[in-house]
Image (cartoon, coloured by chain):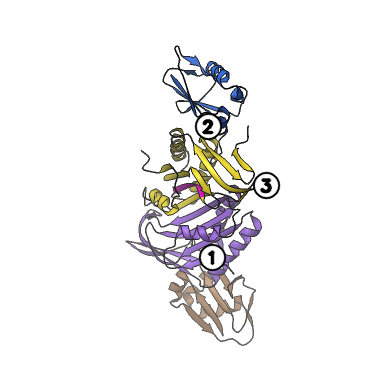
Chain colours: A yellow, B purple, C blue, D brown
Amino acid sequence: MTDGLVRIQKGVFSIEEAVERVKGASKGIGGIVCFLGSARDFSRGKEIVRLEFEHYPGMAEKKLEEIRQRAKENFNIIEMAIVHRVGRIEIGEDIVLIVTASAHRNDAFMACEWAISELKRITPIWKKEITREGEVWISETP
Amino acid sequence: MTDGLVRIQKGVFSIEEAVERVKGASKGIGGIVCFLGSARDFSRGKEIVRLEFEHYPGMAEKKLEEIRQRAKENFNIIEMAIVHRVGRIEIGEDIVLIVTASAHRNDAFMACEWAISELKRITPIWKKEITREGEVWISETP
Amino acid sequence: MITVRFFATLRDMAGVEVKDYPVGEPLTLKELKKRIGDDFPALREIMDSRSILVSVNQEFAKDDSVVRDGDEVAFMPPFSGG
Amino acid sequence: MITVRFFATLRDMAGVEVKDYPVGEPLTLKELKKRIGDDFPALREIMDSRSILVSVNQEFAKDDSVVRDGDEVAFMPPFSGG
């Protein structure tokens, strides 16, 4: 169904591999936009030692696939790929990658921006920040 | 001066290498946006056999560096890289890559969209489309 | 049996990841929450917070959603992926 | 000497890539264009098209820009990179 276009995995991912998977969809692709989220060393004024991500297995993948399908319905894009890592992530490492491809660039930009916002909104994935003072789950509330 | 962050080259480029060059600027990078332009098989209703790009050596590099500097002044980004290929480019191959990095993603998206528009506007690079019926330089006029 | 899962900070508060509830008749999420609150007093207030998301069989659900034998229910704090 | 370069379709129309013009006094781009037009009749009209860009020493320039010995002037059709 998704041909590996939507993935949640522990290990690092390759941007180039994801771009190739998306490019495989059509020779009519002219513009590709990637969003890559990576682990920053500072957050909320605290020095971060590393991050840990947890997900709801099954539901998280389902939501990412839903984002992919809705992006293809609502934007003029040819294909989209999403990869999100879980488990332990060191500073500077990549966390998430979204690749959108279209004939013309504006559609790919719009779909990519929408997809990362939507991912944050509806995908059951949680980040824990490990600092020298301790560990804290990140969420507005509680 | 540019530490290889702005390049015009004949050979293929690596997205991952360009992302690494940009990431090298700071551990405070949280969001990276890439725009990748690639060679489509159809354009203006014609089947394209391949593309050829020509540039004004010296001026083209200077304009790309100018775009990088202005992006860093006008957007809240940490670093930016631009790579543009010239010479012969086959269908499906990459033509141009722009990588923008910021603490938060909106700035990287805005800077990346601006940079590709600005590149098209001020950089002396020309595309020739080779079709079965012949070759044509692309430009609105003449 | 209804399988109830807690994630992230809610799991830490509950002290368990999964808790099974034997059920007879179908019940509403609101009713299930009451039973969970009896077992996990630390969760009682937070479960009703507007920021807590609840799913039934991996789809978002509300207090008046009906759950029955075999369902999987999850309590999730606000997401922070991406 | 002023080095004049033609790019892309303009080079094809001129039939050459570079043409050197010996100069005494500085002159305006407009005056230089007139001399180029005499050598390359095919370019005469197009050089004045609003879509043609001109640079002097790799910076964009206009008809009243002054060029002098040692300068590099380029005539460029609309760009199509990216």
- Is there a contact, CB below 8 Å, between mark 3 and mark 2? no
Task: Name the foreground residue: C68 vs D11.
Answer: C68
Q: Which residue is at 58% across, 66% downward? A: B65
Residue on which the image places disc 2? C7
Residue projecting furthest to the left: B132
Q: Which residues are magenta?
A: A94-102
Graded by Cα atoms within 10 Å as few (under 14), some (14 to 19) or many (20 or more), the crowding at tag 2 reads many
> Which element is circle 2 on?
loop
Q: Main secondary structure of the magenta part?
A: strand
x, y percent for residue C7: 52, 32
Q: Which residue type does callout 1 highlight?
A: Val
Between tags 1 and 2, which lies in front? 2
Which label was assigned to residue A45? 3
x, y percent for residue B84: 48, 63
* In-image side of B56 versus A49 (left or right): left
Q: Which residue is at 42% across, 54% downward? A: A16
Between tags 3 and 1, which lies in front? 3
Residue projecting furthest to the top: C25
